[in-house]
Image (tube, rainbow, N blue to C red):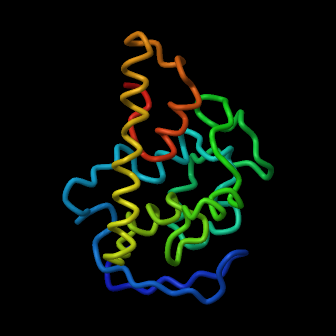
Amino acid sequence: MASDQIIVVNDKMQTEYQYHLEAPEGADFAEGFTPFYPPAKMLELGVFEGKYCNDCRDEFPDNWFDTAKMSDEADASANYFGVKSRQPLQTWCEKGWIFGPDPRGWFQWYCRYFLGRRIPDIDAIQIKRWRAFARHAGQIRANCDPGDVFCRPRQRQALLQWSYDPFI
């Protein structure tokens, strides 16, 4: 997808929501925002129990789903580490973790940001949340032997779902 394009969203959570792509796909990220994986690779590895993008695939490039692990029902075995590592969307809403025009949360924001949408205030909030998530990598380094990639699988799955390297 090219910049200067308008995306129109019609799915179960948004109707006629529109956004403008201002940056090239996968480029011109904010300083210090260095996600480890693009959304397509995250979907390929297995995130959100295979269910995250089921009704909103039309919004994103088809090639993001060529090798994605998808499931009609939430299935922890679709996750790379084979464990459930997420809370229900209702919990995210109750805790105030949903910001701006992205009713599915951080990963939806990241997908749209990766495509080239920019909303400075919302971007700053989400990038700050992403940076704060790095603490989980520190916990893995402090509590796992190097090379033991299945030590703390829930934290590693969560790192993957926030586009950090879970194989640290």
Q: Nearer the viewer, residue 131 or 153?
A: 131
Residue 108 in percent (x, y) is at 52, 64
Count up the numbered dots: 0
* Residue 2 seen in render: no
What residue is at 56 percent from the left and 73 percent from the top? 59
Residue 144 in percent (x, y) is at 44, 14
Residue 84: quadrant of the picture: top right
Q: Nearer the viewer, residue 120 or 75?
A: 120
Looking at the picture, does residue 58 appear above or below residue 142?
Answer: below
Residue 116: quadrant of the picture: bottom left
What residue is at 49 percent from the left and 82 percent from the top? 7
Residue 163 in percent (x, y) is at 42, 45
What residue is at 54 percent from the left and 43 percent from the top? 44
Looking at the picture, does residue 44 appear above or below residue 17?
Answer: above
- Residue farthest toward the front in the current orientation of the protein: 95
Quadrant showing the C terminus: top left
